[in-house]
Structures are given as structure tokens and as C-alpha cells.
């Protein structure tokens, strides 16, 4: 499992959910990469990871800085009003997350992305762009979301825009996949010499270091025993 996922009881409140999401590390360096890192174990087909339902999605998006307080409240009201549509949006979010992961994972390995994954991202990104408009701000202009109040796909649109922007930027060459065993977290390598290998040195990096030390000690012990056996043989 790429990260231990701690589950809580189904009787959780939004406060519980927010606290749980608040403990989730944001190590990707980009919204879309942090989104891919919400998966639990990708060896389990369609696993929701830490995003078990739409309320989890909303809490994560707020934690990641993708939603402001008003947007969060609007979406939670929309969930109560249209639970089936919220469930469908959640399923769509998981599909989008896995498509984005596969696209960036392929890019880090120098492989072409699957057309179906690109189509899924394009659909979400196009939906997002239709809801953006230029607005004057101090010193110039900025993109502003328009007509998205209570739109259940708003978190998906923001993630899709992040992914599309990263894919066409020069930052794409800095995207890495963690070298840790069984870890597939993605991150932007901002190190000076672009040599970062781990999503988190304190977790995967230290684990790999401990494994190397164990293997070295074990190998050294085996070599010592072999040398002793050889010495005994020579004396005989």
C-alpha cells in the first residue's frame, strides 16, 4: 500500500472528515498530483482510497486549497439536495483521479498516455474552461470561476484544470513518481539538481535506507560465515 489509510466509522461528522483530511500530507506540489495521491492501493481496482464519498472529496478539496469556505458550504448543501448526483460525481472523481495518475505516470516513464485517459481529462478540462472568465483585478486580469455555485463537479473541474495546465507547462519534466517500494505517489521535483527520488524522505526515503542497511548487514553476515567455513576447510 502506498500509504496507510486510516478509516473511521460511518457515523463520522463533517468535522471528523475535515480533521482526517487535514492529516493527509500534500506532497505533490500541484493540486492534480496531490489528488492522485489520495489513492490507497492501486493494486485494488477502483479503490476510492481516502475519498470514500462525496463529503470526503469536499473535505479534501478544502484541505488542498481548491475550495473556499463558501464553495464548501454550497457543495454540502447540494449533496443533501441531490445525493444521487453527488454519488455520481464522486464516482467520476475517482475515474478522473486514476486517469490523471496514469497520464503522469506514463510521462515520468517516457511512455505515451492512453487515448481514453486523455479523452476523460479533456472532457473535464473543457467543462472547466467553459466556466472560467476573465475578470479585472488590481494590476491586470485573472481567471474567475463563473456559474459554479453548488455545482457538484466543481472539485473535478479545478483538478482537471490543474492537470491540463501542468501537462502543457515546462514543469512537466519535473514530475516524478516515488521510488519507494509499493509507493506510487507523484510529486514535482523542486530540488536544485532535480535528484529527488522520494515523495517524503521521512517516510519512503528512510524506509528504503533501512532496507538497504538491513540487506547490507545480512549480506555481510553471510559473507563472514562463508569466510569462516572456508577457513575451517583450509585448516582441515
Image (cartoon, helix red, strand yellow):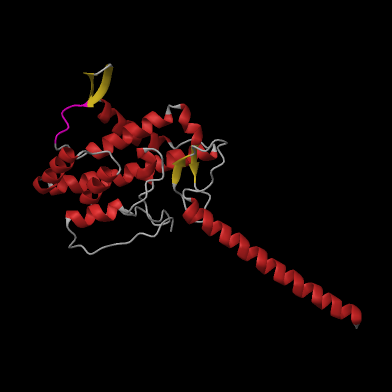
Against 102, residue 137 (above or below) is: above
Locate residue 81 relative to residue 22 in the image: left or right: left
Q: Which quadrant would the C terminus be assigned to in this image?
A: bottom right
x%, y% of residue 137? 23, 19
Give 136 or 37, whichever is nearer the viewer.
136
Instruction: Name the residue located 51 percent from the left edge and 39 percent from the top edge.
Output: 108
Against 133, residue 32 (above or below) is: below
x%, y% of residue 101? 41, 43
Locate residue 36 relative to residue 212 in the image: left or right: left
Instruction: Name the residue located 53 percent from the left edge and 49 percent from the top edge.
Output: 179
Give 96 or 180, whichever is nearer the viewer.
180
Q: Quadrant of residue 103?
A: top left
x%, y% of residue 2? 44, 55
In the image, which residues are magenta? 145-149
Locate residue 99 relative to residue 210 in the image: left or right: left
Task: Look at the image and say whether residue 98 sits in the magenta stretch.
Answer: no
Against 65, residue 137 (above or below) is: above
Instruction: Name the residue located 27 percent from the left edge and 56 percent from the top edge.
Output: 20
Magenta segment, principal secondary structure? Answer: loop
Residue farthest to the bottom, as pictured: 236
Residue 92 visible in the displayed image: no
Instruction: Name the residue located 48 percent from the left edge and 54 percent from the top edge.
Output: 202
Amino acid at each position: 500500500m502506498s500509504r496507510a489509510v486510516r478509516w473511521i466509522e460511518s457515523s463520522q461528522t463533517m468535522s471528523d472528515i475535515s480533521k482526517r483530511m487535514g492529516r493527509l500530507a500534500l506532497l505533490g506540489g500541484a493540486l492534480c498530483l496531490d489528488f492522485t495521491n489520495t489513492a490507497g492501493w492501486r493494486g485494488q481496482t477502483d479503490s476510492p482510497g481516502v475519498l470514500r464519498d462525496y463529503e470526503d472529496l469536499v473535505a479534501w478539496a478544502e484541505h488542498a486549497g481548491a475550495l473556499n469556505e463558501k464553495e464548501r458550504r454550497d457543495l454540502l448543501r447540494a449533496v443533501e439536495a441531490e445525493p444521487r448526483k453527488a454519488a455520481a460525481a464522486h464516482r467520476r472523481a475517482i475515474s478522473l483521479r486514476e486517469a490523471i495518475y496514469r497520464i503522469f505516470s506514463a510521462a515520468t516513464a517516457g511512455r505515451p498516455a492512453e487515448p481514453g485517459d486523455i479523452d476523460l481529462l479533456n472532457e473535464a478540462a473543457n467543462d472547466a474552461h467553459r466556466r472560467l472568465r476573465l475578470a479585472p483585478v488590481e494590476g491586470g486580469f485573472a481567471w474567475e470561476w463563473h456559474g459554479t455555485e453548488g455545482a457538484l463537479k466543481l472539485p473535478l473541474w479545478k483538478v482537471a484544470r490543474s492537470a491540463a495546465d501542468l501537462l502543457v507547462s515546462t514543469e512537466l519534466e519535473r514530475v516524478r513518481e516515488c521510488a519507494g517500494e509499493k509507493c506510487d505517489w507523484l510529486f514535482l521535483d523542486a530540488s536544485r539538481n532535480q535528484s529527488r527520488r522520494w515523495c517524503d524522505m521521512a517516510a519512503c526515503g528512510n524506509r528504503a535506507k533501512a532496507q538497504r542497511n538491513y540487506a547490507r548487514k545480512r549480506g555481510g553476515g553471510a559473507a563472514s560465515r562463508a569466510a569462516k567455513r572456508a577457513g575451517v576447510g583450509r585448516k582441515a
